Amino acid sequence: NIKGIIFDLDGVICSTDEYHYQAWKSIADDEGIYFDRKINERLRGVSRAESLEIILERAAAVYSPEEKAALMEKKNNIYRELLKNMGPGDVTEEVRSTLRELKERGYGLAIGSSSKNTRFILERTALTDAFDGISDGNMISRSKPDPEVFIKAAGILGLKNEECFVIEDAISGINAANAAGFHSVGIGPAAECDEAEFKISFFSEILDI
Ligand code: B16
Ligand code: MG
């Protein structure tokens, strides 16, 4: 009785997780703070402000709220510059055709992303029309692992939480989905975690669950 599918954006629909990493890496390097891909795994799905706090765990200095705000703005500017290079070719044919097939099968499709850049990314990749609803970082006050972003997405689709799959690459997102009674599907890093109800190794496997 699954009627809707809610997709995380960064790391599921497109590889913007790599751009988040590059932008934070350049901030950390400028500040002389150690940061690597392993630490980066903790940033998946969490908000910009929480991401900065994780990076600053290794900082020698104490940062004021104003300095933190400046670093977040600097990171977002670097990230947006990287996003400007994106186009429709940055979404794989596998993702596009799977979304088309799911729509043909009658599922409601929504985005549930912590990112405030969601609409910009969907426009750049010509994907806005592929979804019936968009729930993003601008609409929530608590980010994953809080389920708020997914609850909003289900609301937009007019469905109950238990009628929806949530497709996630982040453990924070899997925990968010489970906390509110969604059916969680892990892909990429999240396919390694025990909490995911279903695990897939490539995107089009959603068609077979
Ligand atoms: P922004 P998702 C999340 O997107 C990213 O995984 C996370 O790394 C990022 O910090 C967060 O969006 C906020 O993004 O700075 O663009 O508002 O995975 O929930 O689609
Ligand atoms: Mg993600």
Image: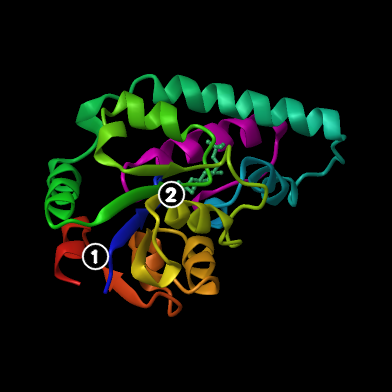
For the residue carrying disc 2, how many other residues have a C-alpha within 10 Å: few (<14), some (14-19), or many (20+)?
A: some
Q: Main secondary structure of the magenta part?
A: helix
Q: In the rendered view, would you say 58 is above or below 115?
A: below
State the image coordinates of residue 189 (x, y, percent, origin top left).
39, 62
**For the residue labelled by badge 2, is the local secondary structure a helix, a strand or a loop?**
helix
Of 74 and 1, nearer the camera is 1
Q: In the rendered view, would you say 141 is above or below 119?
A: below
* Residue placed under numbered mark 1 in the picture: 201
The region drawn magenta spans 12-37
Of 78 and 119, nearer the camera is 119
For the residue carrying disc 1, how many other residues have a C-alpha within 10 Å: few (<14), some (14-19), or many (20+)?
A: some
* Residue placed under numbered mark 2 in the picture: 156
Q: In the rendered view, would you say 177 is above or below 56?
A: below
Residue plotted at (26% across, 28% down):
126
Beta carbon at label 2 within 8 Å of ligand 1: no
Check if mark 1's residue and mark 2's residue have beta carbons within 8 Å.
Answer: no
Total of numbered circles in the picture?
A: 2
Residue plotted at (68% across, 51% down):
54
**Label 2 sits on what residue type?**
Ile
Residue 13 magenta-highlighted: yes
State the image coordinates of residue 96 (x, y, percent, origin top left).
17, 42
Task: Choose top left, top right, bottom left or bottom right for residue 82.
Answer: top left
Residue 170 magenta-highlighted: no
Task: Judge from the rendering whether residue 146 lies leftward or rightward of residue 196; answer left or right.
Answer: right
**Label 1 sits on what residue type?**
Ser
**For the residue labelled by badge 1, is the local secondary structure a helix, a strand or a loop?**
loop
Task: Choose top left, top right, bottom left or bottom right for residue 19.
Answer: top left
The quadrant the C terminus occupies is bottom left
